Image (cartoon, rainbow, N blue to C red):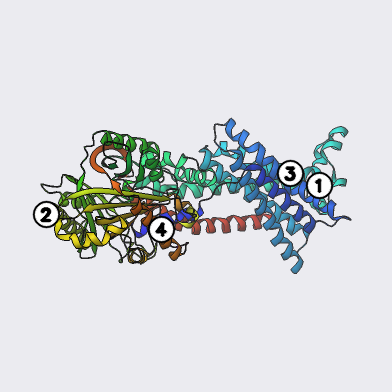
Amino acid sequence: MTATQGNLASLSRFIFRAPHWYASLTFALVIAAVTGVAAFDSRFVLEDAWQGVFFVGIPTVVASFATPYVDRYFGGGLTHNRSSLLAVFCELVVIAFLIVAGVVAVLTSLSQEFVLDALLVALASIFALRLLVVVAVSRHPLPVAVVPASVQTVTAAALLGIYSGATSVMLDNPTLRRMLSRPEQAPSALHEVALLDFGLLAFMCGLYALTVWLYLTVLDHPWRSSMGVSMLDFLGGFLGHIAEGSRELEDFFEKLGEDAIVPVTVFSVRRPGGEEKARFVLPMIHPGPMGEIGGGNLPERVALEADGLAFPPHATAGHDFNLVTEREVDDILSAAETAYQRLEYSSDATPSVRVDEGSATLTGQAFGSNAFLAATFSPECADDVDYAVGLSAAAEARTEEVDEVMLADAHNCNDGLEGEDLGHVVPGSQRSFDMIYGAGRVGDLLSEADRGSLRCGVAWDETPWEPLDGIGPLGIRVAVFEVSESEDSQARQAAKQSDGVNGQTTAYVLIDGNNMEPGLREDVVDAVDAVDRMEVLTTDTHVVNTVEAENQVGDAIPHEELIALIDQLTEQAVADLEPVEAGMESETAEVTVFGNDRTETLASTANAVVSLGGALAAAFIAGVLAISGLVFFLTGG
């Protein structure tokens, strides 16, 4: 990916899952009770806690339960979990305002009225925040969004009116006055609230709503002018994804998408005439953009479809070839199944060859009239290989003796998201030509290589690590291919007879992760001596990026433990060697992807808006607070 795309990918650090509504409300009530103990001065601590729960917690509870129903009445999609999380956050905002105002009042000559003014500003502020979220999530027009957005502020204002006695001047009926005016049951601090304060609150809410509209209009303009879509669609989808893992973000990506035809190559290994032992599946798409959005969880979906042990290596494709929705994965799997049904198997293969061309290292092996190649730039750092570069390299590797080529990007050395160049291998670069020329040399060597009988062994471990550690659900998988050698290598064969190995052995290690720490690939290759040659690949799964954007293999886990596990699995795969036959076939799939340059445009626009949004928000907040202060000054509040 480019540096711009890296900045966009770093937004994944905000991804989390909203807690269940009951967990959010429990936290809210506990915080409210603590606030009551700190803010009120009754005879008993429990009475203070109860007052905190009542005056601070009740608006949160009402907003949590009522907002989804009101929102859905107008056709919105706010869930209870999201509503509760939003209500709790707004409660914390109110508490923060009161704490700061209280400290200022104690340290200065300001009176209790200053704290009450801060409370009114806080209630108007959470209304504005809720309005922004409701507009983004439910896509209501601003006048409609005001209704669900105002629930928490209106509830808090109603409690203030009832327990301050401010409502009594509007109530002529004694019964209503007894029910809706209870100043004798409230803390003395609330007695300072007057009817004018509610007029000020209404004015500020109107002012803040206008500010929200202006803020969204300014930020939305670059999106509409450059891509013809609304920023609110992206914001709503992103909020839905981080809160509950919803697929709303895919609807936004689908509006940006372009149709593409991508090759899907299947390489299957089976026992002679029998069941499948291993299946390599390589669709030329990128498993992103993040989490399980689009094709982010493609490797696991591929694994679930295979009869044998599945190996879904990373293809030579960048973020422009992200699938826009997870539904597109079905088309990929359908094409893979079609290719699988057309397979023709052969029991002969060549020993593996390795070529160094510039900064590129390619390892290849022919199986029948087909070849598997893995390319790496390690120990130099690199990220995705452009789609066109991969197609050109695969075409260069084809010869009269090699018909079909599966070219995998080993994707096994990167140094994160720092710097201007994140290692994307683009057409016209020196690295692209290194890879293309290297693939051509591998094809020539495989065409001239002797062939022998093929044996294969596999091993797999889910590992004790999780996506938080940079390892996806497929864990670590090892496939070892042994090819019998020509008669002039009898001495070497005899040396291996005691281990049951009769020819050259090559191990392909596939780690379900997104790239690797620099140097780790070399450490693995040097440490494992159970085979003659080894290459280490990653799937580039993006399920590990729901934690952070650069959660690479080896970043969070001890290298020695990873190497020890790979060594153990390689020995198990060698012990599992048995005669097999292999076949390779390709099929094309028509899918919708982000499209050429759309990822860069999206990333550039999003990064610009993120940079602008913070400064603009600060300016708007400073402006409305200044106006609020002026209003309080002019009204004597």
Give the residue pinned by disc 1: 164
As measured in the structure, the alpha-carbon distance from the residue carrying label 2 to the one carrying label 1 is: 93 Å
**Which residue occupies the foreground of this view, 570 or 524?**
570
Residue at image position (82%, 41%) is 169
- Residue 506 image point, x, y percent: 27, 56
Q: Mark 4 or mark 1, which has the lower sequence index?
A: 1
As measured in the structure, the alpha-carbon distance from the residue carrying label 4 to the one carrying label 1 is: 72 Å
Q: Which mark is residue 72?
A: none
Disc 1 is placed on an element classified as helix
Amino acid on which the number 2 mark rests in the picture: Glu
- Residue 444 image point, x, y percent: 13, 55
Q: Which mark is residue 448?
A: 2
Q: Are marks 3 and 4 in contact (CB under 8 Å)?
A: no
Residue at image position (76%, 48%) is 53
Answer above or below: position of 174 versus 577.
above
Residue that extends furthest to the bottom in the rendered view of this protein: 107
Q: Mark 3 or mark 2, which has the lower sequence index?
A: 3
Q: Which residues are magenta?
A: 548-557
As measured in the structure, the alpha-carbon distance from the residue carrying label 4 to the one carrying label 2 is: 34 Å
Answer above or below: position of 297 versus 438.
above
Disc 4 is placed on an element classified as helix
